[in-house]
Image (tube, helix red, strand yellow):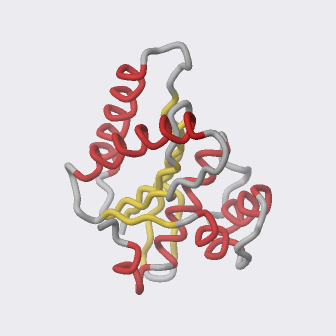
Amino acid sequence: MIVLGIDPGLATLGWGVVEAEGDRYRMVQYGAITTAAGQPMPQRLRAIYGGINQLMDIYAPDEVAFEELFFSKNVTTGMAVSAARGVALLAAAQRTEELYEYTPMQIKQAVTGQGRADKHQVQMMVRMLLRMEENAKPDDAADALAVALTHIHSHRARDMFRIK
């Protein structure tokens, strides 16, 4: 099974591809789709849409897992990130119905065993679990790998996390 993990963002959308076979998994690739702050919103969304389509073409994931958005202070930023997430979700949904989402706390719990783990702890565990020599960069890509790992760990209960 190949899982594409996505950490939504407008300026930086992290992605990570993990392949699972039984209880074994390996990192295939990771990266980020970036857009410049000075670009008009439609161009930025088009870049994200095109980038997700490219990832779907290259890696042909069996399932796609998203980090659920969480924002509490800046509503304007939250709306922009929501637009980016919507475009990424649309691009993936045009290729598969196997779409899932996990909260930040669920991801931290699955990867570190602690729902309140900090970013550094998550990155260390991702690196260890995927036998990587160094942390994935940017941080958004490391987060996306954590999303993919969470989905793999949750596979038996995956229907609970299917996007409805």
* x, y percent for residue 117: 76, 67
- Vertical comparison of 56 with 117: above or below: above
Q: Residue at x 29, y 39 (%)?
A: 53
Say above or below: 39 vs 120: above
Q: Quadrant of residue 143?
A: bottom right
Q: Quadrant of the N terminus?
A: bottom left
* Residue drawn at (40%, 62%) of the image: 3
Q: Nearer the viewer, residue 41 or 130?
A: 41
Q: Is residue 135 left or right of residue 130?
A: right
Q: Quadrant of the C terminus?
A: bottom left
Residue at 50%, 58% (x, y): give it: 68
Q: How many marks?
A: 0
Residue 121: x and y in percent read 78, 63
The image shows residue 135 at horizontal and vertical percentages of 72, 50
In the image, farthest residue toward the left: 94
Residue occupying the point 64% across, 51% down: 72
Residue 4 rendering spot, x and y as whole percentages: 42, 56
